[in-house]
Amino acid sequence: KQRVMRIVYNVVLGRTHQHRLDVEPHLLRRPLAMGELVEVRSHVDCWRSAVITRVRWDRVGRVFSVMLKVGDRHAGREVTVPGTAVRRQFPENCSVQFYAGPDVGWKHGVLRSASLSDNIASSSTSVPSRHSVKVEQTTVGYSFPRLARLL
């Protein structure tokens, strides 16, 4: 007789030391790495498109060197920022997961409108740390647009 076992991890988050129990492998997100497209928060609280050029650790956590992307008035400039000022940039038409609330949970979708991220790369307007984007939910048999928040 065979027994089916489920693989899960107990995780402790880096800076906050919060515990997450029974985390399935598909829910783990890989760390940001060199060459990855990201958005970087500037000192005036606007987000700029960049590419990671170096990752290192210091006493307070992960630190990234990034090259600001074309379209920004600071394009080509390399800056060093703490991990708290960096987030992944999701290009249009990429597959994402989004949180649809406590009753529904996490859903799969395709990012259909990344205009805010595109706009950030070409201007330095102030934007909130969370923003709404149009995500087309993908399920078997149908799909429909849904407004989602990327955290």
Image (cartoon, rainbow, N blue to C red):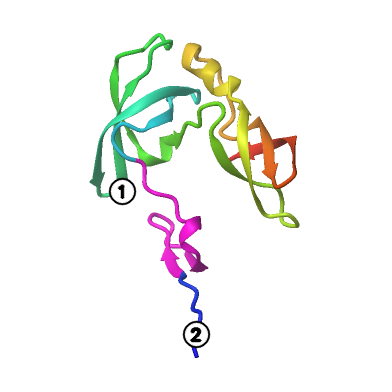
Query: Few, some or many C-alpha atoms within 10 Å of disc 1 (few <14, some 14-19, many ≥20)?
Result: few
Position of residue 79 measured from the top left corner of the image (x, y, whole percent): 29, 24
Q: Which stretch did the figure color magenta?
A: 9-32
Mark closer to the chain start, 1 or 2: 2
- Residue at 43% across, 22% down: 49
Q: Secondary structure at mark 2?
A: loop
Q: Residue 60, labelled with which disc?
A: 1
Position of residue 60 measured from the top left corner of the image (x, y, whole percent): 31, 48
Q: Residue 3, labelled with which disc?
A: 2
- The Cα–Cα distance between marks 1 and 2, rounded to whole angstroms, is 44 Å
Front position in the image: 7 or 82: 7
When the figure is inspected, residue 82 is found, relative to residue 10, above or below; the finding is: above
For badge 2, the amino acid type reads Arg
Position of residue 45 measured from the top left corner of the image (x, y, whole percent): 50, 26
For badge 1, the amino acid type reads Val
Q: Residue 144, labelled with which disc?
A: none
Q: Quadrant of residue 146?
A: top right
